[in-house]
Image: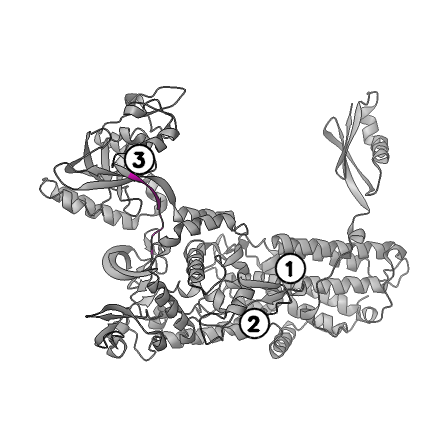
Amino acid sequence: MEGNNIPVYDFDGVEKKWQTIWSLNKTYKVYKDPAREKYYLLEMFPYPSGKIHMGHVRNYTIGDVVARYKRMKGYNVLHPMGWDAFGLPAENAAIKHDTHPAVWTFDNIAYMKGQLMRMGFSYDWDRELATCSPEYYRWEQLFFIRMFERGLVYRKVTTVNWCDGCQTVLANEQVIDGTCWRCDRQVTAREMPGWFFRITAYAEELLSGCDRLIGWPEKVLAMQRNWIGKSVGVEIDFPVMGSDRTIKIFTTRPDTIFGATFMSIAPEHTLVNILVPGTGQEESVATFVSRSKADRQRRRPIDEDMLEKEGIFTGRYCVNPFTRAQTPIYVANFVLMEYGTGAVMAVPAHDQRDFEFAGKYGLPIRVVIQPTEARLEAETMGQAYVDSGVLADSGPFTGMASETAKTAIALYAEQHGLGIRRTTYRLRDWGISRQRYWGAPIPMIHCPTCGIRPVPEKDLPVVLPTDLKVDKSGRSALAESESFYKATCPQCHGKARRETDTMDTFVESSWYFARYTCPDFIHGPLDKGPADYWLAVDQYIGGIEHAILHLLYARFFTKALQDLGYLAIDEPFINLLTQGMVIKDGAKMSKSKGNVVDPNELIEKYGADTVRLFTLFAAPPERDLEWSDQGVEGASRFLLRVWRFILGNREILTKVGPMPKFSDLNGPSRTLSRKVHQTIRKVSADIEDRFHFNTAISAIMELVNTMISLSPVEEGGERVAPAVLKEAVDTLLMLLSPMVPHFCEELWERLGHGKSLAVVGWPQFAPEIAKDEEITLVIQVNGKVRSRIQVSVDISEEDLKETALRDERIQKIIAGMAIRKVIVVKNKLVNVVV
């Protein structure tokens, strides 16, 4: 029975109390311990924007539950936190607020750290790092130099994605639907020099590695495989008539080459400016190319299939090396320079895009693959035939199955000097030069005599000066600062110029997880002992929006660092959870939509534990969470109910005798004890196997209901044994503590326990107690469900058959019928066949 003097649940006081205790005792500080099994739990670290939002709260709460659960299971848990502190957002915000990016960033870090601590997350704060610290990026600069020495870093002039709003270059992966991933401004093409990581050197490793990432969502792996884009085919040269030039094409369908009736090249192809002069097509081609480039910048990749196919004749022809046919060359808006060679042999009978283009411009269609069950005629085709079949009108290959012909034609091309077999990838090298100030300086020196030379290792880090005024236009102050760019060549000691581009901020996040293993190590980027012990990350948690950008780069960096001797692993993350978004009023929370819920206000009103409980209970982690004010209220009411019940029975719970044997318990005690063990089994499985905290919490709520309904009463009747009730309450607090740690710690202490829940082991269940004494079985007649019965789990098959046949509803249905047989499916059903 609840007492009349139950203390008020002062969530603010309780939470601050335990946060102080954890901080002073360094409860979550960890060390390498080879005697214990490690578990490295990591959430994607945040950009210090100034405030945490509900997306942060959900992401980090999910991770914290897993970290606390694994710690209670006996693992040595590494759970660090830091700050992705360089990059455009901080610089743009600092410009907007007329302050320096360093000031803006570190002020935000201090504020956000306070917010995260207020949520009670179990981070080892002694491992905290900020990527804008010279102590961090000095090692990144060393990696850059080592990769440069290995040929994994190079500089070239190329056409880049330029964002005028951010005044910088963007990697291909940072252009979303033709716009900047940060500011949504239209991206344009511009030629300029830049630094590149040779990520393509690892294309095959990155692709094949996907098959081993069995702990990753298939959706993420599919996105990575598609972005890498492996194609196996043939590269063939089409000679240009009246010229010594050739057009190189790549095709995965060499079996269709006899059906090529025209050539399509991308508007950006370098041959356009070489082939067209002197044809009389100069002006019209130039106009088309200009318009196509502008259209491409505006349209989204998803629109490509719906794009109206357009092109223009260049006035020139090439020769199909297999048919010797004169083949017109078109510039086409659907051919992309970044795929293959930027030129496509057009086979309209067997490619839908080519089919539509040929129909529009009256170009010939030649069928060279016939299906086995019918015969196609070019004049009556309504669409391209893209499946396999038998070759027709294909010279010596006629009559050959198309799959066989692919190999035969590829071999013929190589033997006769017409082409070579190749494997190509959609993946392009990672351009990391950024023309902005707030980033890690690239450690290279340009010497007019010696060329480009790396900064000597002894001179690292190349420190980003923090005394420069940031230009409101966004242009980098480094390029204007003589004190920064003036340098001495490390080889000839003559006057030289320091590189003023900074690194893409994704470089910092490509290896931070490794630095967490040894953040204070000063003799190199990584201390091999701790790095080998902790890595790889056992569980990584973050948004699906990073499926290509961050995750692909982190995988590349890990493989490169392994080859350079810094890491023993070749994949950074064993398991990956991509949590859903937080939705309110049918849309993702955002300031622009005006549907943001401020975590600070919720914490002030309900406490951090209530916010944690709601975010976990509202939806499974991989699904979107629909915000509900009523849901938050419900979480608060549940905690208050548990608080009142436990403290109302504190006198009973703190004065109990030994736990009786299960076989000696009375009815209510047996019922509650069985529920306790079933709940342990359920919650353990939900966290361990699926991270389905919502169903785990639901099971805990059922335990609370059972506990309250069977709690000791004064009015007489069978009472639950106090020792059984104590077992139930202690188990409840242990199971609930990863979700609402402050709340459970406080109640645990008030019940007289000496040890903190942070060091208490996870409860174990007894299978013989957890199993149901009775189960409900379906009874079918001729396969149709006709009744249900409750029977003992230990009932024999013969007794079960007799019980089913004695059921009143079954007797009425089968009256007067002959029973042919009775089929039993253990613990599921009985089927009476009549």
Of 561 and 165, which appears nearest the observer?
561
Q: Tell me if residue 95 is in the magenta stretch.
A: no
Q: Which numbered mark, 1 or 2, is in the foreground of this view? A: 2
Q: Amino acid at mark 3?
A: Arg
Q: Percent from the top left, x then y, of residue 437?
A: 31, 71
Of 772 and 217, which appears nearest the observer?
217
Looking at the rendered structure, the secondary structure element under dot 1 is helix
Q: Which numbered mark, 1 or 3, is in the foreground of this view? A: 3
Vertical order, 49 against 545 (above or below): below
Mark 1 → mark 2, Cα distance in angstroms: 32 Å
Mark 3 → mark 2, Cα distance in angstroms: 56 Å
Colouring of the image: one colour
- In the picture, measured across the screen, residue 281 lies left or right of residue 131, that is left
Q: Percent from the top left, x then y, of residue 210?
A: 48, 49
Q: Which numbered mark, 3 or 2, is in the foreground of this view? A: 2
Instruction: Name the residue tied to disc 1.
Output: 634
Instruction: Name the residue tied to disc 2.
Output: 124
Q: Amino acid at mark 2?
A: Asp
Q: Is residue 657 visible?
A: yes
Q: Percent from the top left, x then y, of residue 480?
A: 24, 74
Q: Tell me if residue 428 is in the magenta stretch.
A: yes
Q: Percent from the top left, x then y, of residue 135?
A: 42, 75
Instruction: Name the residue tied to disc 3.
Output: 353
* Mark earlier in primary sequence (1, 3): 3
